[in-house]
Amino acid sequence: NLILRSSRTIGVLVPNIGNPFFSTFFRGIQKVCRQAHYLPIVFSASNDETSEKYYLGNLVERSVDGLIISSSSVTADTIDSILKPNHIPYLLFDRNQTHDDGDRLQVDDYQGGQLAAEHLIKLGHQRMVAVFPENLTNNLEKRLHGFTDELKKAGIHFNPKTDIVNAPLTKLGGYEHADEVLSKKATAVFCANDELAIGLYRGLHEHGIKIPEELSVMGYDNIDLAEYVTPKLTTIEQPILKLGETSAQLILKRINDLNMERQLVDVPVKLVERESTARPH
Ligand code: RIB
């Protein structure tokens, strides 16, 4: 009996709880769960498949009612072998795009990349560099493609082999790659997320580089911190809190009706123009 088995809990798997994107996302989930008298439990397994499996197995044993999965380390195999046979509803989000048939909340990453490129092109930049992790999850791949496709359309030369700096999506990642970014002699840099951009700020500052006079810096996400750094960060906004709320609404709907048709929700992004980008000098 499904009703008796309910523990009124929702498991939330995120790649990194230290990342403000995922903590704001969780805040949104919490808000909706609370109104519905559900308890969300968050797990951050730092991209480690074994821990993800451990947490998932435990949640299933404890009769979790549903799962929101945004880490890519929850593999298709794990979903098929643990969740599906136990009929546990799940919603995929962000970095997890393992299944094409389940419920999914997706943000238009391709459009986000395009908007970033469009903004920098409009300002007159011709020489751009992108800072992205080496192993791209599907969402980041789309983000980067949107960016490079837009440059191509505008006839701007961009060589993916030499014009992409590989760095993890962290402040340290940005900080440690400032040298490499500078060696590319670009006038603008597109960072895969805001945290990375903020780390890069510090590296650039230590090199005496002025943003945006000598280098325009563009982020992605619009985390709270983006408007508290100097100069305020120009970025692409994902409606993070809203994404958390919507995820919770979608999984709760699914829990209440296991047989309803697939829920596939698309969310647009938008440019937030602040002070870290300007015309090249
Ligand atoms: O900052 C976290 C980033 O990783 C976000 O851009 C999000 O979309 C994710 O995949």
Image: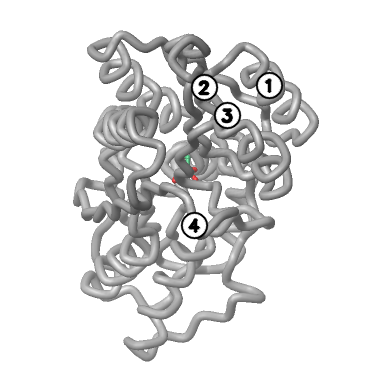
For residue 58, side relative to residue 268 (left or right): right
* Relative to 76, residue 152 above or below: below
For the residues bearing labels 2 and 1, Cβ distance under 8 angstroms: yes
Q: CA distance from mark 2 to mark 4?
A: 20 Å
For the residues bearing labels 3 and 2, Cβ distance under 8 angstroms: no
User: Residue 234 location, x and y as percent?
Assistant: 27, 48
Q: Quadrant of residue 119?
A: bottom left
For badge 1, the amino acid type reads: Tyr
Q: Kindly report which numbered mark, 1 or 3, lies closer to the viewer in this rendering.
A: 1
Residue at 33%, 60% in the rendered image: 112
Q: Kindly report which numbered mark, 1 or 4, lies closer to the viewer in this rendering.
A: 4
User: Residue 15 location, x and y as percent?
Assistant: 59, 33
Q: Secondary structure at mark 2?
A: strand
Q: CA distance from mark 3 to mark 2?
A: 15 Å
Question: Please, which residue is most extreme toward the right here?
Answer: 50
Q: Disc 2 or 1, which lies upstream in sequence?
A: 2
Q: Secondary structure at mark 3?
A: loop
For the residues bearing labels 4 and 3, Cβ distance under 8 angstroms: no
Look at mark 3 in the image and give the residue it sits on: 16
How many C-alpha atoms fall within 10 Å of the one at disc 3: few (<14), some, or many (≥20)? some
* Relative to 133, residue 147 above or below: below
Q: Disc 4 or 3, which lies upstream in sequence?
A: 3
For badge 2, the amino acid type reads: Gly
Mark 3 close to ligand 1, CB under 8 Å:
yes
Look at mark 4 in the image and give the residue it sits on: 101
How many C-alpha atoms fall within 10 Å of the one at disc 1: few (<14), some, or many (≥20)? some
Q: 95 or 260, which lies in front?
A: 260
Look at mark 1 in the image and give the residue it sits on: 55
